[in-house]
Amino acid sequence: MRRDLTRSLRHAWISANESDRRTRFPEYLPEAARPLPMVVAVVAAVALFVVSNLSGTPAKTVARVTIVNNTAYDVEVNASGADGGSLTLGTVRANRTTDVQDVVDQGRAWILHFGAQGADGGEVRMDRADLELAGWRVVVPAGVAQRLGAAGLQPSPVSTG
């Protein structure tokens, strides 16, 4: 039994030392594997460079978009463009006006989506040129309130602040 224990301990010690030697000394690596870490590092650096250059272009923004909500509902407003992506502009309290700063430009056509309390309030398409002429001021259409009321929504509570 003692002889078996000694033999297995010696085998474990030799295996551990072989493992250490292979990880510490690159000359123990096979010839073909020696440049592999350098190749992987170069490929990763090139991929990172390409990705950062593709996404490195800052998005055009509009300094401020003013949303006027003359309805009795707190209205959630989202904007989207031709690319189909959606941008949340925020919630505009009932009978209030809200300024949204640094809004990502949606391009030539803006589609503004309105909703409240999980219900769809409809959408409006506006040309960028019209938004510029209006001073980037958007008024929530009265039809939004009609649609929300028809969906059975109660007006939002009046806020005191």
Image (cartoon, rainbow, N blue to C red):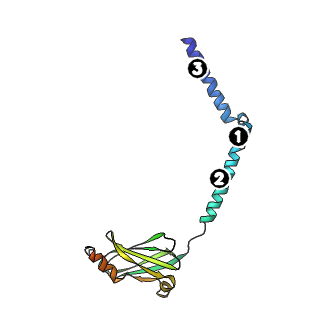
Q: 115 above or below 8?
A: below
Q: Report if the CB atoms under discs 1 and 3 are less than 8 Å apart.
A: no
Based on the displayed image, in which of its 4 quarters is residue 99 positioned? bottom left
Residue at x 50% of width, y 82% of height? 128
Disc with the residue nearer the chain's start (2 vs 1): 1
- Amino acid identity at mark 2: Ala
Which of pointers 1 and 3 indicates the residue nearer the eye?
A: 1
Asked whether residue 145 is in view, the answer is yes
Residue at x 62% of width, y 61% of height? 51
Q: Give SS at disc 2.
A: helix
User: Which of the numbered marks, if any, corresponds to residue 44?
Assistant: 2
The residue carrying mark 1 is: 33
Asked whether residue 159 is in view, the answer is no
Q: Where is residue 46 in the image (x, y as percent from the top left)?
A: 67, 56
Q: In which quarter of the image is the C terminus?
A: bottom left
Q: 53 above or below 156?
A: above
Q: Residues within 10 Å of mark 1 (few under 14, many from 20)?
A: few
Based on the displayed image, in which of its 4 quarters is residue 21 positioned? top right
The CA distance from mark 2 to mark 1 is 17 Å
